[in-house]
Image (cartoon, grey):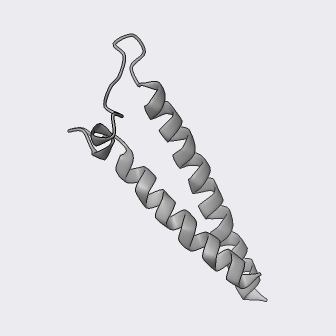
Amino acid sequence: MELVLQILLVLTSLLMIMLVLLHKGRGGGLSDMFGGGVSSSLGGSSVAEKNLDKFTIATGILWFATVVGLGVVLAY
């Protein structure tokens, strides 16, 4: 179980780094390179940016749960 959680932690950490780097900052970001900088003038954020937000939050929750689970497993 410990090995599975460690592998999941590494994978979610790498995915989290990638997703955070894709977000648009003040002066653009890596998301501009992949077409994420295209937004409509009607809605504020683009659909791609909103989906990226959802994926980042879901990955963060999974990462947090993995850290807590690994802490519980290592405590016993």
Residue furthest top as drawn: 42
Relative horizontal placement of residue 28, taking residue 5 as reference (left or right): left
Q: Position of residue 18 (x, y in %)?
A: 42, 56
Query: Which residue is the extreme one toward the bottom?
Result: 76
Q: Give the total of numbered labels.
A: 0
The residue located at (32%, 26%) in the rendering is 38
Residue at 51% across / 66% down in the picture? 13
Which residue occupies the foreground of this view, 63 or 38?
38
x, y percent for residue 50: 49, 32
Q: Quadrant of residue 74?
A: bottom right
x then y, percent, for residue 59: 58, 54
Tell whether 12 sits left or right of 76.
left
Give the quarter of the figure containing the N terminus.
Answer: bottom right
In the image, is residue 24 above or below residue 10? above
Quadrant location of the C terminus in the rendered image: bottom right
Farthest left residue in view? 27
Residue located 62% across and 62% down the image:
64
Q: List x then y, in percent, for residue 28.
A: 24, 38
Residue ID at (68%, 75%): 5
In front: 38, or 42? 38
